[in-house]
Amino acid sequence: MKLFFREQILLIIFYLLQLLVISFIYWLDGYRNLKISLYAAFLSGFLLIGYLFIRYMTNRSFYQRLEKPLTSMEDFSGNLQPSPLAEGLQRLLKSQFRHYKTDLHNYKYKLEGHIQFINQWVHQMKTPLSVIHLMIQDEDDPRFTSIGDELDRLKKGLEMVLYTARLDTFDRDFYVETLDLQKVVRTVTSSQKRLFIRGRVFPSFQFEGNLSVATDEKWLSFVLTQLITNAVRYTVEEGRKIYFHGYHRGMNVVLEVRDEGVGIPSSDLPRIFDPYFTGQNGRNFQESTGMGLYLVKQICEKLGHRIEIESTVNKGTIVRIII
């Protein structure tokens, strides 16, 4: 009703102005019968009210539809009373929706093509990296050791690109199974032994009982790799440890990854899961991309896990994955 009167307010104002002008013209012509003038105005106003009532009843469902938000993209095709205005709007909405679906389909097609290209490119880049790694693995020259370290960085960068591209199609590459959490953690840390050696830090394990979790091993391993990479990167003192602690918290299984690094400033903690946010530490450590913890957060949410972070500057950081 309010929307209807807001639309018709201009018509009502022009009607009143027209009535005053006509009455004034008759008054200038010498017509002074006030009762007849009021009676004519009453009849004219009654006809206006009748017109507005008929118009409102004709388009009532149309105005009600305009005042209610749509619950879905297809919700605009409700039952409307037949009127030129309602039918015209209905045709316009259907035409726009067809264009929207076409554009959305084209966008999805381009996005899928882009993701397929990224996947192919990453796999093509992994092949020469593996060949180079095989060529230098038996060499004792320190220069080849440095090359191996750089190869590890390249490999992790390619994996980050690959997992970022696959994040939107997570459900296509998702397999849940019951896993031994300690075994998964030890496997991931073993694959990162070169990183531990280069950073001169050591892993320490403490698992309370048999911790079985239902999750996707590949995605969880990528999450652990990111956490280990961050823990080693921000541990500047040699001889420190990275602690892996698994335990039960009620019905949940918790995995803590604790380092003895530089810590995260309290002002940065609310934004650490934002994409591309590097914070104060990112300015001091140039290798930071701001994507690691963002991917960790997104993957944990898709796996149905929760993540918590506590940190104290110059004392270290604790990351908890709650499964």
Image (cartoon, rainbow, N blue to C red):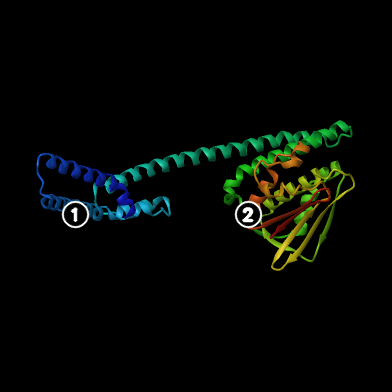
Q: Position of residue 194 (x, y in %)?
A: 83, 43
Q: Mark 1: which amino acid?
A: Gly
Proximity of marks 1 and 2: CB atoms separated by less than 8 Å:
no
Residue furthest bottom as drawn: 250
Label 1 vs 2, first from the N-terminus = 1
Looking at the rendered image, the quarter that the N terminus falls into is bottom left
Q: Position of residue 318 (x, y in %)?
A: 77, 54
Instruction: Please give the residue where the numbered disc 1 appears in the rendered image.
Output: 50
**Residue name at image x 60 percent, y 50 percent:** 173
Total number of numbered discs in the rendering:
2
| Quarter of the figure with residue 275 | top right
Q: Secondary structure at mark 2?
A: helix
Query: Looking at the image, is 286 positioned above or below residue 255?
Result: above
Instruction: Please give the residue where the numbered disc 2 appears in the rendered image.
Output: 301
Between 215 and 242, the one lying in front of the other is: 242
| Quarter of the figure with residue 285 | top right
Q: Mark 2: which amino acid?
A: Glu
Q: Position of residue 130 (x, y in %)?
A: 74, 37
Q: Secondary structure at mark 1?
A: helix
Looking at the rendered image, the quarter that the C terminus falls into is bottom right
Q: Is residue 269 left or right of residue 66?
A: right
Cα–Cα span, label 1 and label 2: 59 Å
Between 283 and 111, the one lying in front of the other is: 283
**Residue name at image x 76 percent, y 47 percent:** 265
Q: Position of residue 113 (x, y in %)?
A: 54, 38
**Residue name at image x 63 percent, y 50 percent:** 298
Between 323 and 22, the one lying in front of the other is: 22
Foreground mark, 1 or 2?
A: 1
**Residue name at image x 14 percent, y 40 percent:** 25
